[in-house]
Amino acid sequence: MNLYSFARGLVGAIIKPLYRIEIIGKENIPNQGGVLICSNHIDNLDPPVVGVTSPRPIHFMAKEELFKVPLLGPLLPRINAFPVKRGMSDREALRTAIKVLKEGNVLGIFPEGTRSRDGKLGKGLSGVGFFALRTDCVVVPCAIIGPYRLFGKLRVVYGEPINMEAYRTEKTSADVVTEKIMDAIGELLEKYK
């Protein structure tokens, strides 16, 4: 058993009962091929929550500062996380993300780039549209519906995949594609709140 599987099992055993996580639509995540899971971001626990509710291992971008934290830093690459410099164009992180998708893996991303202070869905950064257009991945919108309250109820909803073919053919801009993805997340938040 690799470290990712072990960590996923351990974290899942702790947080699933603590937050009474209800998972909806995980069958919308294809069993194989590149998948870009795009979720809203309301709490620091969002990455592990998406990680333990997805049927497939997920790779995440994590802010570069976390890789400098003792104990945590060396552990992150072993659980499929890679660094991203925030607030600037990080070519290395972009290349890594595209490689993850092109190799048929799952990339989890929070298009808002940072946690929402008020729980409302913010504007998405164009990087998510860039990844969707530059690879032949499937895009799956995800909504985390909180709040995070011990023994409350947390809902994680995976929506139907968004077909990117037409956008790729028409050479749609990354900004427009990002908006479409954010709209899909917003619809899930509204429908399942």
Image: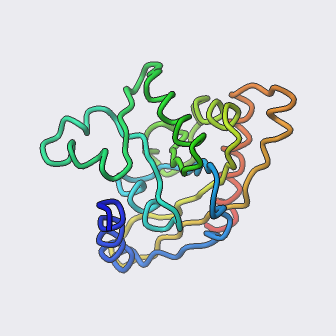
Rendering coords of residue 76 (x, y %): 29, 47
Q: Is residue 84 left or right of residue 120?
A: left
Rendering coords of residue 66 (x, y %): 25, 39
Instruction: Work out which quarter of the rendered image holds the C terminus and state it.
Output: bottom right
Instruction: Work out which quarter of the rendered image holds the N terminus and state it.
Output: bottom left
Instruction: Give the camera-side residue of 60 and 178.
Output: 60
Q: Residue furthest left?
A: 70
- Up the image or down, 30 lies above or below 164; here it is below
Instruction: Give the camera-side residue of 189 and 35.
Output: 35
Q: Is residue 77 left or right of residue 29?
A: left
Rendering colour mode: rainbow
- Up the image or down, 19 lies above or below 175; here it is below
Rendering coords of residue 130 (x, y %): 64, 30
Q: What residue is at 39 percent from the left and 27 percent from the top?
A: 86
Rendering coords of residue 19 (x, y %): 38, 74
- Up the image or down, 117 lies above or below 32; here it is above
Q: What residue is at 44 percent from the left and 29 percent from the top?
A: 93
Question: How many marks can you see?
Answer: 0
Q: Is residue 39 left or right of residue 1?
A: right
Q: What residue is at 34 percent from the left and 35 percent from the top?
A: 63
